[in-house]
Image (tube, rainbow, N blue to C red):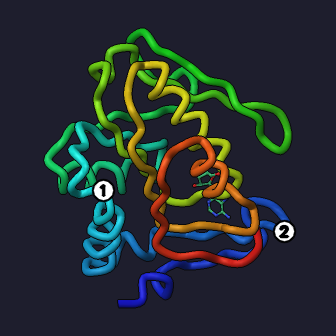
Amino acid sequence: MDLKALIRTIPDYPEPGIQFRDITTLLQDPSGLRRAVDELVQPFAGLSINKVAGIEARGFILGGAVAHQLSVGFIPIRKKGKLPYQTISVEYELEYGTDEVEVHVDCLTPGDRILLVDDLIATGGTALAAIQLVREAGGDVVGASFVIDLPEIGGAARIEAAGVPVRTLMAFEGH
Ligand code: AMP
């Protein structure tokens, strides 16, 4: 099955020069969605994962399905100000300015083995911040799964360098 054919590319969105890799066309395809979730889980299936952490917002859709597949719980990693209880937060650099992601302080039990899930890895800045959050909460990030890799930007290599094995299902050239 050609999962890559189910991704829609939108040129110059949200700004000129960006090729937006749209996963909604994959999500709406029944066998494509099932296959993508199976493939995101596959390398980590035997690794005693306790929880899946998904990054807002597309990581919630895929991560929720991955958590169900592994019969484990789910941790939402959200943009600043969205979570109602006490949080831990990590700030990270964007191309222009900074952003911040948060989890609830009690989102996991120290020692929990966490699988991180998002739709796409570009610079890896968001995923690295998420890894730092999970580690600060006391979790062990045993892997990170993404549908799409943009290898020329180098995010997957940065995540591997941080000690987290990376799974990606396809790669696109450029940014
Ligand atoms: P980064 O922190 O640079 O690895 O960016 C990853 C986040 O930005 C993910 O949550 C993606 O959904 C989103 N993103 C970055 N670049 C793209 C792109 N070309 N197409 C779609 N989403 C993107």
From the viewer's side, name the closer residue of 71 and 60. Answer: 71
Q: Secondary structure at mark 2?
A: loop
The Cα atoms of the two marked residues, 2 and 1, are separated by: 35 Å
Q: Which residue is mark 2?
A: 17
Amino acid type, callout 2 = Gly
Q: Is residue 7 left or right of residue 109?
A: right
Task: Please provide percent x and percent y for residue 9.
Answer: 63, 78
- Judging depth in this view, the residue of 81 and 161 nearest the camera is 161
Residue at left offset 33%, top offset 22%: 107
Q: Is residue 150 left or right of residue 152?
A: left
Residue 36 lies, in percent from the top left, at: 34, 71
Q: Residue at x 18, y 42 (%)?
A: 72
In front: label 2 or label 1: 1
Q: Residue furthest top?
A: 86
- Seen in the picture, residue 108 relative to 144 is either above or below; the reply is above
Q: Position of residue 18 (x, y in %)?
A: 77, 66
Identity of the residue drawn at 42% across and 19% down: 137
- Mark 2: C-beta under 8 Å from nearest atom of ligand 1: no
How many marks overall? 2
Q: Is mark 1 within 8 Å of ligand 1?
A: no
Secondary structure type for disc 1:
helix
* Disc 2 to disc 1: CB gap under 8 Å: no
- Quarter of the rendered image showing ligand 1: bottom right
Q: Which residue is mark 1?
A: 44
Which quarter of the rendered picture does the C terminus lie within? bottom right
